[in-house]
Amino acid sequence: MSRQHNIQRAITELFDVVVIGGGITGAGIALTAARKGWKTLIIDKHDFAFGTSSRSAKMIHGGLRYLQNLQIKLVKEALHEREHLLKEYPHLVKPQPFFMPIYKSRLSKIKLGIGLSGYDYLTGESSMPKHAEIDLEEVKQRFPQLKTDAMVGGFVYYDAKTNDARLTNEVIQEACDLGAIALNYFELTTLQKGNNKIKSITCEDKIAEKSFTIKSKVFIAATGIWTDEILRKFDSNDTKKYMMPSKGVHLIVSANHFPKDCVMLLPTANGDGRMIWCMPWDDNLNVIGTTDTDYNEGNDEIFILENEVKYILDSVNAQLKEKKLTEDDILSVYAGIRPLLNDNDENKKSNQRSRDYQIWWNNDNMLTISGGKLTSFLSMAENCIKTIEEKHAIQSTDNDEIIINTLIDNFKHRYGVKNATLIANIAQEELELTQQFTGYEYCPAEIIFFIRYQNGQKLDDILTRRTLISYQMKDFDEDLVKTVSEIMAKELNWSAEQITIEINLYKHSWKLMHSWK
Ligand SMILES: Cc1cc2nc3c(=O)[nH]c(=O)nc-3n(C[C@H](O)[C@H](O)[C@H](O)COP(=O)(O)OP(=O)(O)OC[C@H]3O[C@@H](n4cnc5c(N)ncnc54)[C@H](O)[C@@H]3O)c2cc1C
């Protein structure tokens, strides 16, 4: 769909929800709303993922560190989300081992061990291994760069890593596949209010330099560190500081400097009790991070200071035996601003502030969500949509759209979104086509899909190579084979005689699979 076409729709249609902010938070909300069949628009004043969502540490994690602050609920939710994302986006969210040294006089082995056991416990069932201890010999072998004089061994545990910007853009693409409209370089400039509601918003198309009015039943501000700025537009008399952001700088170096299979977690050099990590990333890069300092400057252009780079370099170098990193080794640097909620505690260090999020109504139809983590974007989105449902009875204007989206959701885990859409379209012809066969997790719409799109010609093609039904069928299931043959007969114009021939042919193949008896 062209940008022009999308803008035309954006200014002429009444939306169920307009999401302001196309970072991971807004992307997750747009996807969840589109899955519900809601008419959804998502806009961003920059590119999608321009903000914090392309400048994170790239970890999909529970946040082992937050256990120290007893943020158990937050960690548990994020660990649950981590498992979900590993399954849902396996090409973008990948398991990643982490190495944590055990020092003679630093954090004791017992304390670390308890923390990691708690982390494993909160994870529950996982596709990744639980933490394990390694001895000093193995540490020396696997991490030959590290000084080990003060070490007694180490722990290896698992979390996951991602490409945050690509994840955000893929989630927005998925929302658009389900009917949402996405416009980047489209800035909310003013809001028109009346009767405790937002009547419309004015947006500037920053590419064509034109202004447009957009209408929606509900508006959601998911603008991260820009939350205060948006809420001033909402109410210029509101002087409350909703956010207390903190800055995190990362260095990018070649992956060749460090082990390519494991993150190294190392204590910082200045004794502030924090850890620095060197994480192998994509395209032979290694991400080293990070700093955590209060931030009160501009959000659209973030400068990186010499002392921030030095803090990271010094910390890594303090742990390296030889071949220290120099400024020359740095390929690039980036800084992200954490959208931390203001807890009105000026004395707290930024790394002690909660990474939790909040959702609140500004009036009858404007909702703000802020805070949180990349890892938790789907559960944040679900809570946001639930909050809307408690107040507004949004019915999709197009009932067919809801049905089709639900069907896509059901099939996409097995077939991916593209083929799930084809199957959902087939199911639209007659809803009985989604009725599962007794004893098997397949339905007629899938059989028709295999015939129409994947060259299924014979019963054996469908039952053995397109589905796994033959493998499940311990005893020959006359009823099931007859039902499937009738579906095939309709699609392939088989006569009654042909059906009998095809069933007999299949029976022969099935018998071969049981020929040892
Ligand atoms: C250094 C650092 C490391 C981190 N590491 C991790 C990690 O490893 N794992 C993890 O889970 N989380 C991590 N986080 C947290 C995570 O990155 C953030 O919680 C998340 O990216 C925030 O996403 P967001 O969508 O809320 O905000 P953003 O990504 O900032 O999106 C907000 C969007 O709103 C848009 N916007 C603002 N004003 C307007 C307007 N007027 N009109 C239209 N659009 C507007 C902006 O352009 C922006 O794109 C880290 C954060 C930082 C800073």
Image: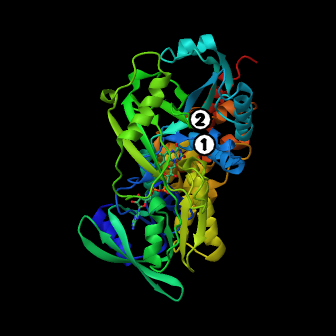
Q: Earlier in the sequence, mark 2 or mark 1?
A: 1
Q: Is residue 3 left or right of residue 415?
A: left
Q: Which residue is mark 1?
A: 82
Disc sitting over residue 425 in the figure: none
The vertical placement of 29 against 86, above or below, is below
The residue located at (35%, 68%) in the rendering is 187
Q: How far apart are the two marked residues, 2 and 1, measured between alpha carbons?
A: 8 Å
Kindly state the secondary structure of the residue where label 1 is placed: helix
The vertical placement of 496 against 275, above or below, is below
> Are circles 2 and 1 on residues that touch, CB within 8 Å?
yes
Kindly state the secondary structure of the residue where label 2 is placed: strand
Disc sitting over residue 159 in the figure: 2
- Disc 1 marks which amino acid? Arg
Q: Is mark 1 within 8 Å of ligand 1?
A: no
The residue located at (69%, 49%) in the rendering is 71
Q: Position of residue 387 (x, y in %)?
A: 63, 69
